[in-house]
Amino acid sequence: MATGRTHRPATRSRGIPEATVARLPLYLRALTALSERSVPTVSSEELAAAAGVNSAKLRKDFSYLGSYGTRGVGYDVEYLVYQISRELGLTQDWPVVIVGIGNLGAALANYGGFASRGFRVAALIDADPAMAGTPVAGIPVQHADELERIVSDNGVSIGVISTPAGAAQQVCDRLVAAGVTSILNFAPTVLSVPDGVDVRKVDLSIELQILAFHEQRKAGEDTSENAPDPAAPPVRSASAGRKGPDGDMPAVMPA
Amino acid sequence: MATGRTHRPATRSRGIPEATVARLPLYLRALTALSERSVPTVSSEELAAAAGVNSAKLRKDFSYLGSYGTRGVGYDVEYLVYQISRELGLTQDWPVVIVGIGNLGAALANYGGFASRGFRVAALIDADPAMAGTPVAGIPVQHADELERIVSDNGVSIGVISTPAGAAQQVCDRLVAAGVTSILNFAPTVLSVPDGVDVRKVDLSIELQILAFHEQRKAGEDTSENAPDPAAPPVRSASAGRKGPDGDMPAVMPA
DNA sequence: ATGTCTTTGTGAACGCGTGCACAAAGATAG
DNA sequence: CTATCTTTGTGCACGCGTTCACAAAGACAT
């Protein structure tokens, strides 16, 4: 989600609910697998199982796209692949730039899931002059100075940010100014963008924290619970007292 | 505020909505930043802006944790950092294993966001014998044969899967059998796990596809709309007679 | 044709999450 | 102590998403 504005007209998207849109890629993947096995048709029950969702939900999702099934038979796999691809806009080519070619950026550049879905890595951009020219995933890295030109020349409308958190907002601003209207942000920062620009966030750390919460809950059900450390009171003042016996925040990588 | 002795009876862990849990890491990050700047207190309005959410939502979220604010003043930053960390289970050490040390796995191993939040990379595991011993992020990669032993010896309950899709389910099964109860899956596959095991999925390709959908929608509002590609709807065998949803589909069916 | 069987498409009920709006709580000043 | 001002905490209403359950639609057998 974006920062200042969490717009969601919902009615705008051709009437397709956001939650449904988020599941379409899931169905598409399952259908593609079936297609490769030359399976002609599939029932909502089977496809739902393959996609890991409820069959009623799947049928309702498809109902937003139209009536593409045949009662008593199921859905035509090839036809559905086409319809969903089209609805998602994957029948056209999307040039994408990746900014910040560190470990993660390189991984993204090498990720096959992009190219196979209509996305084309138009350019890799990094602020480090030493990286300029170095090929990553067969694509030479270009310097950040070229950002505006690259976006403009290639008609890029989707940008991926995999820079450190500190550089993310600035990169974002430049991308938007250059014409990018959709951003996939891997940096652990809240980006603020003008209206009309979509931002999706992928935060590896947050996902782990959510897992930790549930993990702790599971562990707490066994034991008598509540005794990790009832100590450590408010410490209310502004004193820089580091709390906790956990001494969290090593702030340094084990590398 | 006394010493927030208000322990919720039994609803403490279970009463927190999932949506709230998902936002806690967001608040925690914003609060940590404030803490580093030695800001003593913060109002719901300010914090909400920093986290990119609505202030009413933030206050309601915090209300599930207890009454940690002071009316007329705001929230004590340090205290809130501690409470949220504790609620998320970040005051304890979570050993994590990463299975599949390709580009993505290496990026994850190097990701600083893990170590700084109580997560410790206990081991890197890969199926390629050639990688065994090679240090990645300062940690030597171990062979997949060691998986069970590593999980067991280190008491690992959280596993990260960054293998190719084809290997993910098998790795998942082995992790679960070895005692892992929370899995963060980066492989583009639906994992099936027994009850009691949590799985969270991060799918880079899906995020881009969702962006593409909205991007297409934006573009479609300007142009004449519709008719992006009336070409070649896959003609599938079996039955015939397709019903066009709303005229926007050529549906070349023979009749 | 007629009947049976399978599977879709959807109306309706329900539950969760969100945001408004305001009373209560506490700080602060006089 | 009283008055005023700030900000929290929450009751309430609304809308989205999920799920149930079933009628309608078509395939298939007789």
Image (cartoon, coloured by chain):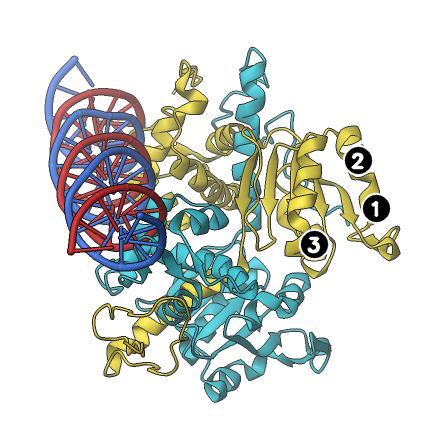
Chain colours: A cyan, B yellow, C red, D blue
Identity, as a three-letter code, of the amino acid under mark 3 = Gly
Mark with earlier residue (2, 3): 3
Q: Which mark is residue B164?
A: none
Indicate whether B143 appears above or below B150. below
Q: Position of residue D22 (x, y in %)?
A: 19, 38
Q: Secondary structure at mark 3?
A: helix
Residue contact at pointers 1 and 2, CB within 8 angstroms: yes
Q: Quadrant of residue A76?
A: bottom left
**Residue D28 or A169: which is nearer the viewer?**
D28
Residue contact at pointers 1 and 3, CB within 8 angstroms: no
Q: Which mark is residue B150?
A: 2
Q: Is residue A172 left or right of residue B253?
A: right
**Residue B246 or C16: which is nearer the viewer?**
B246
Q: Position of residue A23 (x, y in %)?
A: 41, 54
Q: Position of residue B192 (x, y in %)?
A: 56, 41
Label 2 crowding class (10 Å Cα cut-off): few <14, some 14-19, many 20+?
A: some
Q: Subunit of mark 1? A: B
Q: Which residue is mark 3?
A: B105
Disc 1/disc 2 C-alpha distance (Å) = 9 Å
Q: Which mark is residue B142?
A: 1
Q: Subunit of mark 2? A: B
Q: What residue do we see at 31% from left, 63% from top?
A: A68
Identity, as a three-letter code, of the amino acid under mark 2 = Ile
Q: Is residue B82 visible?
A: yes
